[in-house]
């Protein structure tokens, strides 16, 4: 790869069953580009967790993905309620997901920790009442 | 054991024949919490679970799971079956509980390798 590429995705805040479409699409694109499988798996998992969070908590939003020669940069932007205590939200097992989401197998408080685990860099920018942006980088 | 070889054994009912059935199954994996499976499901694994919703298929696709076995006769709804077909994921079903279903697979692989 000699140039950078940008992909933009809109994430619906209403349809939980469609969550994962953006990460699935990126996964297929990266595989087609010949990116190493470990990096593809990291990107797919980190971005999918982010998508799920955007649907459950953020009311949907936008994902910007930049594919650079040596890394992929993801910005997941929502305009939901924001995160009051980011350190608390980062703790495994802490969750504010509703019962309906738990019954589908999510809401175990693993989303943000998984995103951190599978990305090489992660920063969360959040303002209560305005929304959250999660910035993640996976190196190739 | 490959996915195709597992299909031919008829240990479980075949719900959907996916793509790449010549793929070698790496290891059995049991989990019903998708958040955990997302971070821990082994690449190329055979995943035993009772969770049979659309997101199960999404997690399997993203983690490169070789095939899924739905225990306790859990069944895919129309949307989930469509997802299994579009993602090319092989899905089986069994009336056995998760542990028994996984042990059945494990014993066959162990005996085959002796």
Image (cartoon, grey):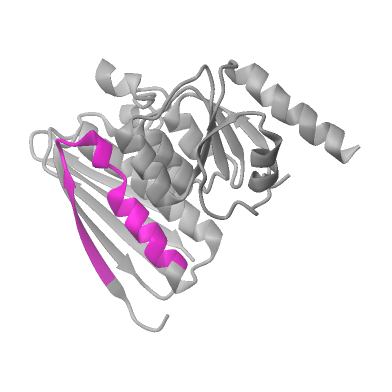
Residue drawn at the location 61% of the way across and 47% of the way down: B44
Answer left or right for A1 relative to B41: left
The N terminus of chain A lies in quadrant:
bottom left
- How many numbered callouts? 0
Residue A106 location in percent, x, y? 36, 27
Q: Quadrant of residue A87?
A: top left
Q: Pick whichever, B90 or A109, lies toward us.
A: B90
Relative to A65, say whether B42 is above or below: above
Q: Quadrant of residue A9?
A: bottom left
Q: Pick whichever, A59 or A136, lies toward us.
A: A59
Residue B65 location in percent, x, y? 54, 44
Relative to A44, say whether A93 is above or below: above
The reply to whether residue A136 is in sight is no
Residue drawn at the location 19% of the way across and 36% of the way down: A15
Q: Pick whichever, A74 or B83, lies toward us.
A: B83
The reply to whether residue A5 is in sight is yes
In the image, farthest residue toward the bottom: A2
Residue drawn at the location 39% of the way across and 24% of the way down: A108
Residue A110 location in percent, x, y? 41, 31
- B84 in magenta: no
Answer left or right for A80 relative to B8: left
Answer left or right for B106 relative to B49: right
Q: Pick whichever, A126 or A43, lies toward us.
A: A43
Residue drawn at the location 36% of the way across and 22% of the way down: A94
Residue B1 location in percent, x, y? 73, 44
Range of residues picked out in magenta:
A6-31
- A12 in magenta: yes
In the image, farthest residue toward the right: B114
């Amino acid at each position: 790869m000699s140039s950078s590429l940008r992909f933009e995705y809109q994430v619906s805040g209403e349809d939980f069953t469609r969550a994962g479409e953006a990460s699935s699409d990126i996964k297929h694109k990266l595989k087609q580009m010949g990116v190493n499988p470990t990096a593809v798996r990291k990107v797919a998992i980190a971005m999918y967790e982010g998508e799920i969070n955007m649907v459950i908590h953020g009311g949907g939003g936008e994902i910007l993905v930049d594919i650079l020669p040596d890394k992929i940069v993801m910005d997941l932007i929502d305009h939901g309620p924001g995160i009051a205590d980011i350190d608390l939200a980062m703790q495994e097992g802490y969750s504010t997901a509703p019962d309906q989401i738990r019954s589908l197998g999510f809401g175990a408080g693993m989303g943000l920790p998984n995103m951190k685990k599978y990305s090489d860099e992660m920063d969360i920018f959040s303002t209560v009442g305005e929304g959250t942006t999660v910035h993640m980088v996976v190196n190739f | 054991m490959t996915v195709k070889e597992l299909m031919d054994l008829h240990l479980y009912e075949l719900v959907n024949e996916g793509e790449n059935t010549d793929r070698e199954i790496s290891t059995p994996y049991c989990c019903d919490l998708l958040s955990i499976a997302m971070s821990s499901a082994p690449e190329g694994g055979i995943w035993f679970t009772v969770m049979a919703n659309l997101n199960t298929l999404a997690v399997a696709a993203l983690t490169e799971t070789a095939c899924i076995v739905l225990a306790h006769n859990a069944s895919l709804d129309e949307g989930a079956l469509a997802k299994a077909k579009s993602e090319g994921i092989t899905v089986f079903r069994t009336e056995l509980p998760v542990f028994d279903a996984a042990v059945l697979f494990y014993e066959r692989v162990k005996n085959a390798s002796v």
